[in-house]
Image (cartoon, grey):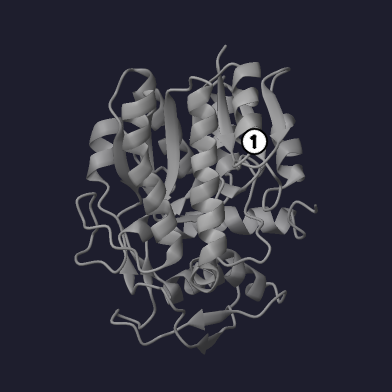
Amino acid sequence: MPAVLVTGGAGYIGSHSVKALLGAGRRVVILDDFSAGHRGTCAALQSIASPDQLTVVEASIGDTATVERACREHGVEAVMHFAAWLSVGDSVTDPAGYYRNNVTGSIGLLDGISRAGVTRLIFSSTCATYGEPQRVPIDESHPQQPINAYGETKLAVERALPHFERAYGLTSVALRYFNAAGADPDGLLGEDHAPEIHIIPRAIFAARGDDALQVFGEDYPTPDGTCLRDYIHVADLADAHVLALASLERGGPSARFNVGTGTPHSVKSVIEAVGRVAGRPVPYTVGPRRQGDPSSLYAANTAIREALGWQPRHADLDTIVGTAWRWFEAHPQGYGD
């Protein structure tokens, strides 16, 4: 059986997609340097994999020779590429690091898989490629004008993909995520970043008394003054990747899709949802705006619904928060590695 190489498969979204692939009976090769991913994630995934279904290769995406060798040795015919740095704020203060990791590393990966004859790629992109919205909801025709280095680096890779298709036959689907959130409904996997930058886990930590929560600005032109975002459950994101791969395997064309629920929620409404799930108010303070944050980002998702038949199964905000809460309650120290 051909394999799917999953870069960053020990990370948050990558691991949930690996689980979805394993559940579909696919053979998977995780490639991760464990700079942000977790060995505990791989152990959890191994616990549900059949014999010889899951292999882990410890390497950087920029190690072209190792990428090529892994693809050839394991019969890789498709790649899901998640490995990237992801903090908007850090990308503003360290653009060199973001370009080195997200762009140079990705080009090394694309070179390696192309040399190995791989012809299908699902790329983890982001709504940050759009920048400050000219209109909402945002559809795929919206101008891509990033306002931070994170969005610029993802857009740089998107722009490289058509060239790799023309030269090497590498077809691709780029999925522009909105705000990934929640945890595996089965409780096997969750979100464990160090440091944690996402609002739902940070609000959960505050509700448990583990950490302080600061809201970055409440003077945005939104109903309650805090940023509006589209929170998409990580398992629904994983479903989108599996459907996108199936489309390419059927001979479908390269494509670019938004992946979001289409419903915006403010930062304060997320904090209130965590309070409902926790059964207690979430303490927080308000600080200045964070550089590089647009006021409102939410998706028009008609294109992916019509082209791939995708639809979110866990769109309710309290449901999303509930899965995250249960995982953190069961794993107070995260994966522990």
Q: Residue at x 63, y 38 (%)?
A: 63
The quarter of the displayed image where residue 21 is located: top right
> Which quarter of the rendered picture does the N terminus lie within?
top right
Residue 271 x, y percent position in the rendering = 50, 73
Most distant residue in the top direction: 1
Q: Residue at x 31, y 70 (%)?
A: 296
Q: Residue flagged by tag 1: what amino acid is it?
A: Leu
Residue on which disc 1 sits: 31
Pointer 1: residues within 10 angstroms few (<14), some, or many (20+)? many
Left or right of 98, for residue 48:
right
The quarter of the displayed image where residue 304 is located: top left
Q: Nearer the viewer, residue 216 or 80?
A: 80
Q: Nearer the viewer, residue 63 or 328?
A: 63
- Inspect this view and state whether residue 177 appears: no
Q: Nearer the viewer, residue 155 or 138?
A: 155
Q: Is residue 65 above or below residue 134?
A: above
Q: Is residue 73 above or below residue 201?
A: above
- Inspect this view and state whether residue 62 appears: yes
Q: Nearer the viewer, residue 134 or 276?
A: 134
Q: Residue at x 35, y 83 (%)?
A: 225
Q: Residue at x 73, y 30 (%)?
A: 46
Residue 247 x, y percent position in the rendering = 34, 25
Residue 141 x, y percent position in the rendering = 19, 51
Helix, strand or loop under label 1: strand
Q: Total marks drawn?
A: 1
Residue 47 x, y percent position in the rendering = 74, 30
Q: Is residue 206 above or below residue 143?
A: below
